[in-house]
């Protein structure tokens, strides 16, 4: 059997947040008992709304945040025991806002070269040629290398971020809302580029997004997160065709496809918003769930595994 | 019956930059008119110009700008501020643009009615509570005493909508009202706006970059590109038979669940929006357009494939292949 490139085992992360000067510190459970595996060549989409823990999970997988519990294995090796250089050769990030993730005072060329320079042992001529090739590959003229990020458009900046991620030839790229700040026409350019690069370099992606239409387009497998937990997971085709968890159903129903005449969907969710500082007892989705029964408020649903997917709900069977 | 809001040949400039170049549109009573386009196309400044809220370095000219049949182009600041918040109201993407963090929800909502209608504090607060309930906020009495930061994003958006409705406006201008919200909350807010429109006969000018929002909410759509309305149409025909090559390109960029396959590239528009400065001539889309031809650099004709549609392009309807 092939080994997963990323294996997340029962990972949790708790933050202590103090509200106000004299407030009691609160326990914010951002990620709670999450397990997942990304196989080589796959694209795992992680979807969920703000505060569901998807970005915290991404930071843990990138080694930017320590998990409070559980462990992450990258290519079979423990992330916690891995050095920065080794990690950088395996896994690289592309973040949402290319403006804040690129150093504004450095030229594009130096930004892309930084991971190579950090590795050391590569001649400057070699660095230059690799940077030029990578800029060209992501659709930027090498002359752009002399510019500063502020002199580029949002789409160009995201291309720089992608070039920086790929210049080390990693095997995994973690994309955290890579197109959320972009216009639709630019989003399409970037998504197409990411798809080409994946095939060309044999990459695997962990693709985090709140946009379900985008995830359906790019992902081979999808995990739906709610208040820190994966409440449903399945291969993308099955999950979008046959969602089981009431939250997944509501999320899918909320997607406004560009089809006139269909009107605005009724989600049935009510106005209670999920609060990671105050996770409800029982099923964490029950205060918003349109089909919740008494049991849902008392008993935490266990993870049920089916043929291809898993789901955490008293009222749903896994696919 | 004439439209509630009429904008004809609106031009907005900031120094040498022409942000809007001859935009025309009409919003009818009880109708949602979506103004759609990508960043920098001029859709938000168009809305601000209608409200008389352009920043001081922006200049506005128009052939006609009328509300309820009456010219508002010549109104002074005093006249405009009487209209704003009263007969026409505006809501923004970020509710904190219009909510004051230092005042309770109740006091800033009441202020609107006290200022415009000379209502008593008591009556104004009653009206505020009634509207909070109307935008489906539970326990409105408690919310009146809260500060904006104590509310979630979706609740703040509801409060802002309720505040905009204090004086029973006829026109609501909504600039990306759901862009910062999660999808489930977005659906709830858009549904609320649609219900309010049905109940109150509101005319809504909705500014958005999201074609899904357009398809589901609009009666009529104006597509903006580089400061011009390049296409205007009833919503169903715009999606079923887009005419302008930019509209066509934009529609092909959107991943539609169930319609596009994984590993198949999305449509995309090559290149970037050009910088349009004074003296620009021809079609601003020509460098990115798959159908471009030499006469696109000259004056562009506005064409009318149906009586209630128009688009700005050199290519005639019968020369335009089905998309």
Image (cartoon, rainbow, N blue to C red):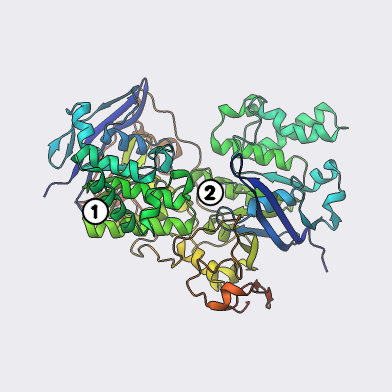
On residue B239, which mark appears?
none
Q: Is residue B47 above or below residue A192?
A: above
Q: Is residue B56 above or below residue A243?
A: above
Residue B55 x/y as whole percent: 35, 26
Q: Residue sitting at 26 percent across and 40 percent down?
A: B85
Q: Give the structural element (helix, strand or loop) at label 1.
A: loop
**As drawn, is A201 to the left or to the right of A186?**
right
Numbered disc 1: what chain? Answer: B
Q: Residue B216, can we see it?
A: no
Q: Is residue B193 above or below residue B275?
A: below
Q: Give the structural element (helix, strand or loop) at label 2.
A: helix
**As drawn, is B196 to the left or to the right of B211?**
left
**As drawn, is A289 to the left or to the right of B122?**
right
Residue B71, quarter of picture? top left
| Mark 2 or 1: the one toward you | 1
Residue A204 x/y as whole percent: 72, 55
Numbered disc 2: what chain? Answer: A
Q: Residue sitting at 56 percent across and 56 percent down?
A: A275
Residue closest to the eye, B47 or B140: B140
Characterize the local packing of mark 1: few (<14), some (14-19) or many (20 or more) Cα atoms within 10 angstroms.
Answer: many
Characterize the local packing of mark 2: few (<14), some (14-19) or many (20 or more) Cα atoms within 10 angstroms.
Answer: many
Residue closest to the eye, A275 or A107: A275
Q: Residue A311, can we see it?
A: yes
Which residue matches tag 1? B31
Which residue matches tag 2? A188
Residue closest to the eye, A229 or A239: A229
Real-space CA distance between mark 2 and mark 1, rounded to the nearest whole angstrom: 31 Å
Q: Residue sitting at 65 percent across and 24 percent down?
A: A105
Q: Residue sitting at 23 percent across and 37 percent down?
A: B115
Q: Quadrant of the C terminus of chain A?
A: bottom right
Residue closest to the eye, A101 or A276: A276
């Amino acid at each position: 059997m092939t080994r997963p490139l990323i294996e997340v085992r029962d990972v949790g992360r708790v933050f202590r947040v103090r509200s106000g000067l004299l407030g009691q510190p609160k326990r914010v459970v951002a990620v709670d008992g999450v397990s997942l595996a990304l196989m080589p060549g796959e694209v795992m989409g992680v979807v969920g709304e703000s505060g569901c823990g998807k970005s915290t999970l991404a930071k843990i997988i990138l080694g930017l945040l320590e998990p409070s519990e559980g462990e992450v294995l990258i290519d079979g090796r423990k992330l916690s025991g891995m050095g920065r250089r080794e990690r950088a050769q395996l896994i690289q990030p592309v973040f949402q806002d290319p403006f804040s993730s690129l150093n504004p005072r450095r030229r594009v060329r130096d930004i892309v070269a930084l991971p190579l320079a950090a590795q050391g042992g590569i001649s400057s001529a070699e660095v230059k040629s690799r940077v030029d090739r990578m800029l060209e590959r992501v659709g930027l003229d090498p002359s752009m290398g002399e510019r500063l990020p502020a002199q580029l458009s949002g789409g160009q900046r995201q291309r720089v971020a992608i070039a920086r991620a790929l210049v080390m030839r990693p095997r995994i790229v973690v994309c955290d809302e890579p197109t959320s700040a972009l216009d639709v026409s630019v989003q399409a350019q970037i998504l197409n580029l990411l798809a080409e690069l994946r095939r060309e370099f044999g990459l695997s992606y962990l693709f985090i997004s709140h946009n379900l239409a985008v995830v359906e387009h790019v992902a081979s497998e999808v995990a739906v997160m709610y208040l820190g937990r994966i409440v449903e997971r399945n291969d993308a085709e099955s999950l979008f065709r046959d969602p089981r968890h009431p939250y997944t159903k509501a999320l899918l129903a909320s997607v406004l496809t560009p089809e006139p005449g269909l009107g605005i969907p009724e989600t049935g969710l009510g106005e209670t918003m999920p609060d990671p500082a105050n996770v409800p007892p029982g099923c964490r989705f029950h205060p918003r769930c349109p089909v919740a029964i008494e049991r849902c408020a008392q008993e935490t649903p266990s993870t049920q595994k089916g043929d291809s997917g898993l789901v955490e709900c008293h009222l749903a069977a896994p696919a | 019956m004439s439209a509630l809001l009429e904008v004809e040949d609106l031009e907005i400039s900031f120094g040498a930059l022409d942000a809007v170049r001859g935009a025309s549109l009409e919003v009818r009573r009880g109708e949602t008119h979506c103004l759609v386009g990508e960043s920098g196309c001029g859709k938000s400044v168009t809305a601000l110009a209608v409200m008389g809220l352009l920043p001081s370095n922006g200049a506005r000219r128009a052939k006609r700008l009328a509300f309820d049949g009456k010219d508002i182009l010549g109104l002074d600041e005093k006249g405009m501020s009487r209209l704003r918040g009263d007969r026409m109201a505006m809501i923004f993407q970020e509710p904190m643009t219009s909510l004051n963090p230092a005042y309770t929800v109740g006091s800033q909502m009441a202020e609107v009615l006290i200022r415009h209608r000379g209502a008593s504090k008591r009556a104004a607060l009653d009206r505020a509570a009634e509207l909070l309930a109307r935008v489906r906020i539970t326990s409105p009495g408690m919310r009146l005493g809260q500060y904006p930061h104590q509310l979630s994003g979706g609740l703040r958006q509801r409060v802002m909508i309720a505040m905009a409705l204090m004086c029973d406006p006829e026109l609501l201008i909504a600039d990306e009202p759901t862009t910062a919200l999660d999808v489930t909350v977005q659906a709830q807010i858009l549904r609320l706006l649609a219900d309010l429109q049905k109940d109150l006969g509101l005319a809504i000018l909705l500014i958005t970059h999201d074609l899904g929002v357009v398809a589901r909410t609009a009666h009529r759509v104006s597509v903006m590109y580089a400061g011009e309305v390049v296409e205007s149409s009833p919503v169903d025909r715009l999606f079923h038979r887009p005419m302008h090559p930019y509209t066509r390109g934009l529609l092909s960029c959107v991943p539609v669940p169930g319609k596009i396959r994984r590993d198949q590239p999305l449509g995309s528009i090559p290149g970037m929006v050009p910088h349009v400065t004074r003296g620009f001539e021809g079609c601003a889309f020509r460098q990115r357009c798959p159908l471009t031809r030499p006469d696109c650099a000259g004056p562009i004709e506005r064409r009318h494939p149906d009586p209630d549609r128009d688009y700005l392009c050199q290519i005639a309807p019968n020369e335009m292949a089905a998309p």
